[in-house]
Amino acid sequence: MDGDLRAFLQRAEELMARLEPLLPALRAPVDWSTSLAARWHREGQGGYLQALSVSLDLSLDDLIGIDRQRDLLSKNTRQFVSGLPANHVLLWGARGTGKSSLIRALLAEHARAGLRLIEIERDHLADLPKVVDQLSGQSQCFVVFCDDLSFEAGEGDYRVLKSVLDGSLERAPENVLLYATSNRRHLVPERQSDNDNWQMIDGELHPNEAVEDKIALSDRFGLWLSFYPFSQEHYLSVVRHWIGSLADKAGLTWNWDESLEKDAIRWATARGNRNGRCAYQFARQWVGIHLL
């Protein structure tokens, strides 16, 4: 019997050695008293939240020329962390105009009040109910952040998002909001063929159901914030701000003059776009060269 038992235990150990690499690793829960942000990772049939080390050096004052959008989003977030009614938010518009930066700056502004940030990729939105379930019951307030949100024709994940935002019997808890950025206002591409089946009945227009289904997603966001391409004056004001900020931190003496302004304009012309991201990149290039 002893020999049979030893053989059984040996085979059991060999089996466990083969199975363990296939099993998901044990993940420690995020300590929200010390962690300000986390990212959702898909693993097997489930997933887990991984704590992130974040920098809080970006403030709302660093975002130049988007005062209306900044004030509306900041007020909505203050309502949220104060336990008052607040809306899911869609930030849509031109690329590089401060949509994602605005959300990161909000974390620095409201972290002490209990705000926490959760990043989730667009391809993992089917896991959103699992993420929300892990956040329910926590004392902190969580903004689930999805950057560059959009869907192609035929993808069904947007229906999961519609259900979580508003429309299912089990709604998201009061301590969870979704903030999403996108270059598309309606998130799902609309095609001219969607309008081919519109009909006129007794003088009333009945839109094609496919159009209604697509537009219904963006309707789930209570607050829409629009971001537009920068004018040259707006772009240059952002360049001046970032050069001043970076130069002051490095102890670099500088002056705004016609030559510097022309360099900034050439930089934007070469990139084919004037926006906040372009201004920040030029400022880093200019300050770095002069420090070197």
Image (cartoon, rainbow, N blue to C red):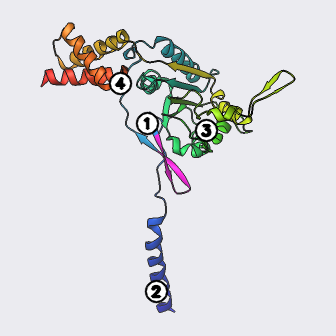
Q: Is residue 257 above or below residue 218?
A: above
Q: Are marks 1 and 2 in contact (CB under 8 Å)?
A: no
Q: Amino acid at mark 1?
A: Ser
Q: Is residue 23 left or right of residue 164?
A: left
Disc 1 to disc 2, how far (Cα)? 47 Å
| Residue 150 magenta | no
Near mark 1 (Cα within 10 A), the count class, few <14, some 14-19 or many ≥20, is: some
Disc 4 to disc 3, how far (Cα)? 35 Å
Residue at image coords 58%, 19%? 79
On the image, numbered disc 2 is attached to which residue?
A: 6
What range is drawn magenta here?
39-49
Q: Are marks 4 and 1 in contact (CB under 8 Å)?
A: no
Disc 2 to disc 3, how far (Cα)? 47 Å
Q: Is residue 85 left or right of residue 247?
A: right
On the image, numbered disc 3 is attached to which residue?
A: 136
Return the residue found at the far left.
292
Q: Amino acid at mark 2?
A: Arg
Q: Give the label on residue 35, or none.
A: 1
Q: Give the label on residue 277, or none.
A: 4
Q: Are marks 2 and 3 in contact (CB under 8 Å)?
A: no
